[in-house]
Amino acid sequence: MLMVQPVAWQPSAAHAAEWLWVHSRDGQTADAHGRDAAALLPRDDMVVLVLPVLATSWHRVVVPKINATRLRQALDGLLEDRLLADPASLHLSLPPGWQAGQAAWAMACEKKALEHHLASLQAAGHPVSRIVPELCPQPDHSQHALFSRGEPWLVNTGPLGVFTQPLNPDQATDPATMAHDAPSSRLSEPACAALAEAVVGHPFTPDTTAQRLLRSAHSGWNAAQFDLRLSAGARRGQRLRQAWLQLWHAPAWRPTRWGLALALVSGLVGLNALAWQEKQALQVKQQQASALLMQTFPSVTLVLDAPRQMQRELSQLQRANGQLGGGDVEILLADISALPAESIGFSAIYFNSPETRLTLTQPTDASVATLRQGLQTKGWQSQYAAPVLTVTPDTASGGRP
């Protein structure tokens, strides 16, 4: 995220525009800051334009219940007597979450200067995705001592609005009286902290420009309203980037982040536990199969592949008793003879249990395919490397033991 603020609000042809800038990767802490021309600003896909406090004015209005397309015109009528300039020359915006029929703070700033700064940033390759005020009305009263336009200023923000006045060492009254209550916080740029404390009579907490600009980006404001619209792509990108930064870095979302982390860890632990259980169950079945093999055939002392070894021992036992095994060549030839008639013959038969090799005579692709398909239906596996067809019992499908 890149927060930028023009050093001079009014454009000047005599001097190149300079910008105060703050860059933050997580949106919470400043990684770098400085003062440069637009062409030298750091690159970032989320650029927030911060309006200087002296460039904005604040006006309390009751938002009329009217069609959105006519709302700007209605605001012009409400503020005409309170503005020092023609409403048409100003850009107006409403706070986040405003509702028709309820009171809200409307912000005004000079439209021509705002459009100039937006165009300058756009030309320098920094399209703005959001516009926010430097300071805005808040539920709690706060005081800010800062430099603007090269002079020290005291700014009071609170439920009664935003009040600004120069920091004058000859002031005889406490400016806090403008807000009718004691400030909950007092923040000052280091360069004017001593002057602010002398004028107000209270200590101020050090506050840098970078910190203030970073806080302004968290206000929730976006002054790109009414006739001033940023590109749809910039708005979508800004919303997604802001949501991402809030989710992964904002303190308010820390419980959610912990919850997601715990859910992820729990899921991984659960998957590992399930995999361990499946592995244990498989080992138990393998042990049972090995025990059954060694119990049935005591001559087997080393178990490597229980199913295959049991099949081999069973076939040997059947042959020793004069019985045919499922993988014997006689069974294979009987199955072949039961297949539909096909013009195919064998010039040689080689049997080495459980494998039988048939040397085919005058095989064709069709005849070989028909023979292999028929053997598969009867529980045999086959591999063909012309002219030899290798046949074995298909123990995996349960067709042949």
Image (tube, rainbow, N blue to C red):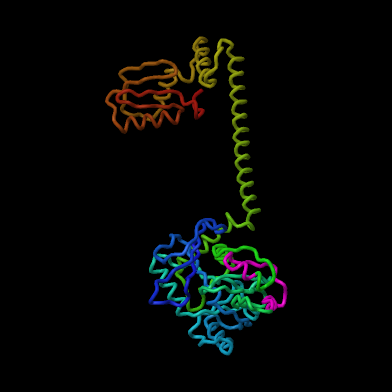
> Which percent across, then down, holds residue 49?
49, 69
> Which percent across, then down, holds residue 72?
53, 82
Residue at image x 39%, y 64%?
A: 39
Q: Is residue 188 visible?
A: yes
Give the tally of numbered discs.
0
> Which percent across, then down, holds residue 85?
52, 87
Q: Magenta includes 192?
A: yes
> Which percent across, then down, holds residue 143?
65, 71
Residue at image x 35%, y 17%?
A: 349
Residue in the foreground of this view, choosing between 107 and 178: 178
**Residue 152: which quarter of the image?**
bottom right
Q: Is residue 101 above or below residue 122?
A: below
Q: Is residue 289 above or below residue 145?
A: above
Residue at image x 67%, y 73%?
A: 200
Q: Is residue 176 left or right of residue 49?
A: right
**Residue lying farthest to the left in this orientation:** 362
Residue in the foreground of this view, choosing between 306 and 149: 149
Q: Is residue 110 above or below residue 35?
A: below
Q: Is residue 244 visible?
A: no
Q: Is residue 229 left or right of residue 264?
A: left
**Residue lying farthest to the front in this orientation:** 170
Residue in the foreground of this view, choosing between 260 and 349: 260
**Residue 112: which quarter of the image?**
bottom left
Residue at image x 55%, y 14%?
A: 302
Q: Is residue 310 left or right of residue 197?
A: left
Q: Magenta includes 59?
A: no
Q: Is residue 320 above or below residue 161?
A: above
**Residue lying farthest to the bottom in this orientation:** 81
* Magenta-drawn segment: 173-196
